[in-house]
Image: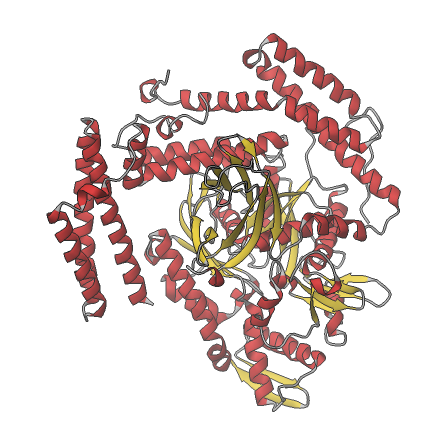
């Protein structure tokens, strides 16, 4: 349970005190939390002095939820209630699960089977009810947040949560939803390879092209970045969000089953046991060349050669992605200055060997491949939360998969191409095809193929409030904006009237806003008062932040950018805000924040433009063409 | 000045087809250092929203000025010259002949034993034509011969597409 810090009325926290920010690696197999303390990033330990938190959640019959090693220990005895590798199910539909392997030791139900509003999401049937992967991930996040708040002695101001670079919009949104459920403020979703590059880049102090080979439990990413003067620029990214160490385990488990003469019809418990044995054997073979395996009364010996033969096809798949990523970046293997290995699965000697061969150099492994991502995330969190000036480091990431819309004939028309640097916005014009049409539906997809059936459906955006006109007269400009987290935002405006269309998002594989609200309510097992206190606290922090920022802004360039009337207006708004932030009514504070936000928006825009002027003034005056 | 200003102004560069690419990259990094949303993570929501928009425009401007073809099209759009230069090209028999020859070569290359070297030949010819056209465009634009410039851009488009296809063919053979 999180201890809430409640200020005395009239006393706000020192705004320039060091803020508590963490980086969270929410991994398929293991999760970690790290923070920057005394200038050094470090992963935080649990009460058993361990860094890693197995991403395993167990639901007990009495409603208790366990996360981590003790949960993993129950996986063979209670497989249906022990959720392992839920990351593989985030942002996926029930149909996708079928391709994740024929044998999964779970009972999966489609979420709409129990009448909830989200369609087609796989939920796990457990003794605690139908659990969505998002809810299970939230449990893992909660444990990490608790660990951090204990270590840092207070509530967190924010977290950077990492995601595979190859995660699509639905998978990213699911991750953000899990954070919302866990009550974590997400500073940024950061791509795992980029996080690793940050950890290595700042560690080695290097410049040049870095290739990050990230093979985790369930996902594979390859990112090619250029590091230059503190700017990490992702040139290209590739991967497979359904390929990882778990697949090595599965291949090995299958081999063991065949050797042991076990049939196809294994119960969940046997399946889980087999997988656990396979994983253990695989890990031993990273240190030794042979290992003894005994399972279900059978025992045998497994050598490295046999393991290599089983996993080579999977490794080759990753190397093909590497080739493609290099091509997309317009580079050859010898243009790459360093190759970095990330993820526990890169400990397998065969993986290292084949990657070294593909890139013609020995990969770097000096930072623990299990911890490097959390460390990179902590470094960025430190900057984003304001503890460190941000002008030393800049991360320019890309969208991994093309975004487009469905057009006539079931075709996908790309609007934003893969490997485009984000944030990015593209507009597309549409028109009505019936007289008096006031609404339209746009189907957004992600992928590289031509047919929509080969791409991933993200959501349907329903535009309403288009002024009724003759068919074809309306000109609706739909703007697709991808932010720095890789999340999509759609807005639409009818150009002839200037009216903004109202947009309703119906995600194909995710939670809509109602679901999130409902799940939030359900997850609160505290008394109602706690919920109010938390909401009040959050609004007070926001109000304080806004007050300080506006005060500083007015003092800095209020007189230069505003006329007397405008300046006075904002002064009044500031005074009101000062009064209202002491209120006990969180809704009143929220309303006021919204009001001040609107009132000061023009001032904010002017300040940003003044910044551009300053930045440009640094260049030679004859360079700039004066536009009168 | 605000963000409806042109892409050259955003980077403090003169409006011209000739662009110093390394200077452009440097200015791009400078601008992103100022406006990337990460710099506003701790600021009020409205500034964050503005930052996402601004950073998006900076990215758009950079990608258009970087590419010789897109830069040419952008320069024409600044003069409000848009539209089909294609119509004039289809009546240029020499150009058409060359396109047909190159495409035939491309098609032959995939079947042939020495596919890679044939593809290289096609790429080299296309590259040199593409470069030559860029010089022609520069001349035409600076002398305000905009209709001619438009036609040159259409030709550039052909070669740009051809180069993409050559690359794709090379990748297919690689796999």
The answer to which of B95 and A250 lies nearer the viewer is: B95
The answer to which of A124 and A158 lies nearer the viewer is: A124
Q: Is residue A14 visible?
A: no
Which image quarter is the C terminus of chain A in? top left
Q: Is residue B96 visible?
A: yes
Check the image and report above or below for B128 versus B34: below
Residue at (61%, 53%) from the top-left corner?
A507
Q: Position of residue B140 (x, y in %)?
A: 18, 31
Rendered image quadrant of residue A291: bottom right
Left or right, A263 with respect to A10, comes to left
The answer to which of A557 and A36 lies nearer the viewer is: A557
Q: Position of residue A526 (x, y in %)?
A: 86, 49
Residue at (18%, 68%) from the top-left corner?
B114
Rendered image quadrant of residue A589: top right
Check the image and report above or below for A112 versus A80: above
Q: Position of residue A514 (x, y in %)?
A: 72, 49
Check the image and report above or below for B109 versus B45: below
Q: Position of residue A595 (x, y in %)?
A: 69, 25
């Amino acid at each position: 349970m999180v201890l809430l810090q409640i200020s005395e009325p009239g006393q706000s926290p020192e705004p320039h005190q060091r803020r508590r920010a963490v980086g969270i690696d929410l991994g398929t197999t293991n999760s970690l939390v790290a923070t920057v303390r005394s200038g050094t990033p470090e992963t935080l330990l649990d009460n058993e002095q361990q860094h890693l938190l197995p991403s395993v959640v167990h639901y007990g019959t009495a409603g208790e939820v366990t996360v981590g090693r003790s949960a993993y220990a129950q996986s063979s005895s209670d497989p249906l209630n022990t959720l392992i590798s839920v990351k593989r199910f985030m942002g996926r539909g029930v149909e996708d699960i079928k391709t994740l392997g024929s044998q999964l030791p779970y009972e999966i139900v489609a979420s709409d089977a129990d009448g909830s509003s989200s369609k087609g999401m796989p939920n796990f049937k457990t003794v605690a009810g139908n659990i969505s992967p998002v809810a299970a991930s939230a449990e893992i996040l909660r444990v990490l947040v608790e660990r951090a708040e204990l270590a840092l002695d207070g509530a967190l101001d924010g977290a950077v949560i990492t995601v595979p670079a190859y995660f699509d919009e639905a998978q990213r949104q699911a991750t953000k939803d899990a954070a919302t459920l866990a009550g974590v403020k997400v500073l940024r979703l950061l791509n795992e390879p980029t996080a690793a590059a940050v950890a290595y880049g700042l560690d080695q102090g290097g410049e040049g092209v870095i290739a990050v080979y990230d093979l985790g439990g369930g996902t594979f990413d390859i990112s090619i970045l250029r590091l230059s003067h503190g700017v990490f620029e992702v040139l290209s990214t590739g991967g497979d969000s359904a390929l990882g160490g778990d697949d090595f385990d599965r291949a090995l488990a299958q081999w063991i089953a065949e050797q042991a003469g076990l049939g196809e019809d294994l119960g969940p418990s046997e399946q889980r046991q087999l997988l656990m044995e396979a994983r253990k054997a695989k890990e031993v073979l990273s240190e030794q060349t042979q290992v003894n395996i005994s399972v279900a009364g059978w025992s045998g010996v497994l050598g490295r050669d046999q393991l290599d033969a089983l996993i080579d096809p999977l490794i080759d798949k990753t190397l093909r992605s590497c080739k493609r990523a290099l091509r997309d970046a317009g580079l050859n293997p010898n243009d790459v200055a360093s190759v970095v290995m990330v993820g526990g699965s890169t400990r397998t000697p065969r993986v290292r060997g084949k990657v070294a061969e593909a890139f013609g150099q020995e990969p770097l492994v000096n930072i623990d491949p299990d911890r490097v991502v959390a460390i990179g995330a902590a470094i960025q969190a430190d900057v984003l939360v304001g503890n460190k000036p941000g002008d030393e480091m800049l991360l320019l990431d890309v969208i991994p998969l093309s975004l487009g819309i469905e057009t006539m004939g079931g075709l996908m028309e790309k609007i934003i191409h893969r490997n485009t640097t984000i944030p990015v916005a593209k507009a597309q014009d549409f028109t009505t095809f019936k007289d008096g049409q006031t609404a339209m539906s746009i189907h957004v997809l992600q992928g590289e193929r031509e047919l929509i059936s080969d791409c991933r459906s993200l959501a349907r955006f329903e535009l309403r409030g288009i002024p009724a006109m003759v068919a074809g007269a309306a000109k609706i400009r739909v703007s697709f904006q991808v932010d720095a987290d890789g999340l999509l935002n759609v807005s639409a405006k009818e150009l002839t009237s200037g009216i903004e269309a109202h947009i309703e998002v119906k995600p194909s594989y995710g939670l809509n806003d109602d679901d999130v609200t409902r799940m939030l309510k359900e997850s609160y097992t505290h008394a109602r008062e706690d919920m109010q206190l938390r909401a009040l606290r959050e609004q007070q922090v926001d109000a304080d932040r806004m007050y300080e920022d506006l005060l500083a802004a007015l003092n800095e360039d209020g007189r230069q950018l505003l006329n007397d009337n405008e300046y006075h207006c904002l002064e009044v708004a500031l005074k009101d805000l000062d009064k209202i932030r002491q209120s006990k009514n969180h809704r009143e504070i929220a309303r006021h924040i919204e009001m001040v936000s609107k009132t000061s928006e023009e001032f904010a825009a002017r300040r940003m433009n003044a910044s551009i002027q300053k930045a440009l003034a640094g260049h030679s005056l004859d360079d700039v063409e004066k536009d009168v | 000045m605000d963000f409806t200003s042109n892409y050259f102004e955003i980077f403090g560069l003169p409006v011209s087809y000739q662009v110093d690419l390394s200077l452009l990259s440097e200015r791009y990094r400078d601008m992103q250092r100022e406006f990337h949303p990460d710099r506003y993570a701790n600021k009020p929501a409205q500034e964050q929203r503005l930052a996402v928009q601004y950073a998006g425009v900076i990215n758009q401007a950079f990608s258009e000025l970087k590419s010789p073809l897109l830069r040419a099209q952008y320069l024409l759009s600044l003069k409000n010259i848009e539209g089909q230069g294609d119509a004039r090209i289809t009546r240029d028999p020499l150009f058409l002949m060359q396109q047909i020859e190159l495409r035939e070569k491309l098609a032959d290359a995939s079947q042939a034993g020495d596919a890679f070297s044939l593809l290289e030949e096609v790429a080299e010819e296309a590259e040199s034509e593409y470069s030559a056209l860029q010089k022609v465009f520069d001349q035409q634009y600076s002398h305000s011969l905009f209709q001619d410039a438009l036609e040159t851009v259409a030709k550039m488009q052909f070669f740009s597409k051809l180069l993409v296809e050559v690359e794709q063919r090379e990748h297919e053979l690689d796999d």
